[in-house]
Amino acid sequence: MLFLNSGYSRFHSGQDELIGMMKEWDKYTEVYKFDIMVHPFWLFHPWIDTTADVMAKFLQARLPKTL
């Protein structure tokens, strides 16, 4: 599970608990934090490009390779 966070900690509510549960279930998690005070930042320039790149790298690393 990939978490994309803004600088607003209030929007991270429950994240630590969910990460703990995922660890118990032996599931991979990754957190990427943007140090910006915009929410929802991923919809706006210039963050949309970085968001798409982070998501693509996460999926490429975690999904099985297929022909």
Image: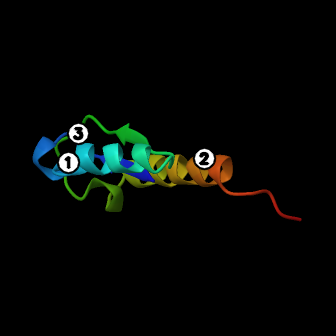
Q: Nearer the viewer, residue 47 or 24?
A: 24
Q: Quadrant of residue 20?
A: top left
- Find the distance from the CA under tag 1 to the CA under tag 2: 22 Å
User: Which residue occupies the extreme top position in the image?
Assistant: 35
**Residue type highlighted by circle 3:** Ile
Residue at 79% in and 57% down: 65
Classed neighbour count for the residue bearing mark 1: other residues with Cα under 10 Å, few (<14), some (14–19), many (≥20): few
Which residue lies under the disc numbered 3? 36
**Residue type highlighted by circle 1:** His
User: Which residue occupies the extreme right position in the image?
Assistant: 67
Which residue lies under the disc numbered 2? 57
- Find the distance from the CA under tag 3 to the CA under tag 2: 21 Å
Q: Are marks 1 and 2 in contact (CB under 8 Å)?
A: no
**Residue type highlighted by circle 2:** Lys
Q: Nearer the viewer, mark 3 or mark 1?
A: 1
Query: Is 54 positioned to the left or the right of 57 in the image?
Result: left
Q: Do the residues labelled 3 and 2 touch (CB within 8 Å)?
A: no
Which residue lies under the disc numbered 1? 12
Query: Is 3 positioned to the left or the right of 66 in the image?
Result: left
